[in-house]
Amino acid sequence: LNGSKSNDMDLTASSSSIDASNNRTNTIRIDVSKLSRPVAVVLDTGLTGCIFSDSLTNEILQQKPQMLDTKLAKTEAFDAFVASMQGVKLQLETLDEVPLELASGAQYWDFSSFYLPWFNGDRSKYDDHFPHIIAVGNTFWVGTESLTVDSKAGLAMIEQTLEA
């Protein structure tokens, strides 16, 4: 089926699931409802790849130890996990309750994970109150016809090309 589909998203809503794959395991699914805090997905057309906040990566590694190389120290294991990431697929909630899938492509794939100082306050005192962040860049926008953001209403519309 060729054509396009359009999904409206509430920009305050979060991802409902995250699939992450690396070269140590097959794809794993992370149920966002089981994380310690919400996940905010940032639609970043100026970014090439994908960024996870370090808080999200650390929590994934705590929940999914099979993603880690256990022969390494904690910091080295974190860095090895980041270097091994081969793709991410997000299932996002939409206003019409039909999930929207955004998947990274091989083109433009690059993955990073680090502290994102996007919120005011002392990290040690307030960090647990901020959402985990996933910034999705151009690697996710292949096959997207348009992205429209209404910042006043807090809504976005993503129109994707459907392929047979």
Image: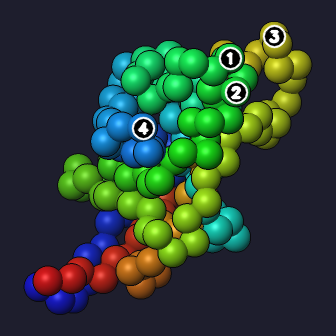
Amino acid on which the number 2 mark rests in the picture: Glu
Q: Secondary structure at mark 3?
A: helix
Amino acid on which the number 3 mark rests in the picture: Lys
> Callout 1 environment at 10 Å: few (<14), some (14 to 19), or many (20+)?
few
2 w.r.t. 47: above or below: below
Q: Which residue is mark 1?
A: 73
Mark 3 or 2, nearer chain start:
2
Residue 2's label in the rendered image is none
Q: Secondary structure at mark 1?
A: loop
In front: 100, or 6?
A: 100
Q: Measured from the top left, where is residue 37 in percent x and y?
A: 52, 22
Quote the CA–CA distance across marks 2 and 4.
15 Å
In front: 62, or 26?
A: 26
| Residue 34 location, quadrant | top left
Task: Look at the numbered discs 1 and 4 and tell me whether their residues touch, using CB distance below 8 Å.
Answer: no
Mark 4 or 3, nearer chain start:
4
18 w.r.t. 121: above or below: below
Q: Which residue is mark 2?
A: 76
Q: Which residue is mark 3?
A: 125
Quote the CA–CA distance across marks 4 and 3.
34 Å
Task: Look at the numbered discs 1 and 2 and tell me whether their residues touch, using CB distance below 8 Å.
Answer: yes
Q: Which callout, 1 or 3, points to the residue nearer the camera?
A: 1
Quote the CA–CA distance across marks 3 and 2.
26 Å
Q: Disc count in the image?
A: 4
At 31% from the left and 42% from the top, the residue drawn is 26
Residue 24's label in the rendered image is 4
Q: Measured from the top left, where is residue 9 in percent x and y?
A: 40, 56
Amino acid on which the number 4 mark rests in the picture: Arg
Quadrant the N terminus occupies: bottom left
